[in-house]
Amino acid sequence: EDLILRCPYEGGVPQGQNVEAASGTIIGLLAKRGADLDSTPGSPSSVGSDKRKAPPLLEAIQQLNHAAVTALVKHGAKPRFLHAAVEKAPISLIEDLLKSHANPLEEDDEGKSVIEVAFKRGDEEITTLLRDSIGDYERQHHVASSTLPIPGEGSQELGQKVRVEDEDEDEGGLGLTS
């Protein structure tokens, strides 16, 4: 599997020429034969003398092999390692992981959030994508990770009903009451 994910192949296909497409096809064939696409090297489900240092999906992300990432997730690999993707992958790869339901709220082993990694990278487009994805995730999973300040009311937790009063808006206020 490691050969599938690394570029260029020794003495074979020149770097960037159909290597990604070939890896996607090979991953599909491995999946048909029952390969464990989430296996971690050294685990009981890994094959023989597996010399990989990372699970196949993480290896594909680290190698920026978009076709392999797409094929792995399509064939059952759990969409994870979003931190690694946000750190250096193109936005299209990050979008595909998010569309496959990678958790944008996940923290790494050091307790860093994905959005923290995005801030460190400094790519505004990726940061915006993650902010939108976090909002979508929170709405879909009813996660309230912060509070919504209401003027004059201290703070109000997300999920509580907020009513808009039309007459207050005419006076220049926000028109929010609890």
Image (cartoon, grey):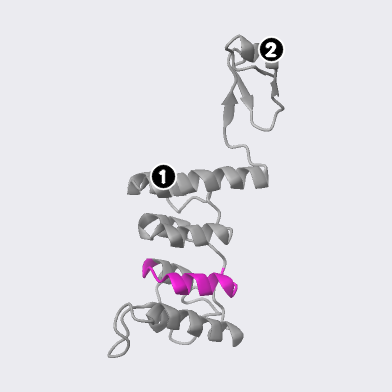
Question: What's the residue at 38%, 67% (across, down)?
Answer: 62
Dot 2: element = helix
Q: Position of residue 78 (x, y in %)?
A: 57, 66
Q: Position of residue 94 (x, y in %)?
A: 46, 58
Amino acid carrying label 1: it is Glu
Amino acid carrying label 2: it is Glu
Give residue 176's quadrant in the image. top right
Q: Position of residue 15 (x, y in %)?
A: 30, 79
Q: Residues within 10 Å of mark 1 (few under 14, many from 20)?
A: some
Q: Nearer the viewer, residue 80 or 11?
A: 11
C-alpha span from label 1 to label 2: 41 Å
Asked whether, in this view, residue 83 is left or right of residue 134, the answer is left
Asked whether, in this view, residue 9 is left or right of residue 77, the answer is left
What residue range appears in magenta?
62-77
Q: Name the residue beneath numbered marker 2.
A: 167
Quadrant location of the C terminus in the rendered image: top right
Total numbered labels placed on residues in the image: 2
Question: What's the residue at 55%, 82% (across, down)?
Answer: 28
Q: Name the residue beneath numbered marker 1.
A: 116
Question: What's the residue at 52%, 51% (across, down)?
Answer: 106
- Report if residue 40 is visible in the image: yes
Quadrant location of the N terminus in the rendered image: bottom left
Tell me, yes or no, whether the highlighted magenta stretch contains residue 165.
no
Q: Nearer the viewer, residue 176 or 86?
A: 176
Q: Nearer the viewer, residue 72 or 171?
A: 171
Q: Is residue 91 above or below residue 60?
A: above
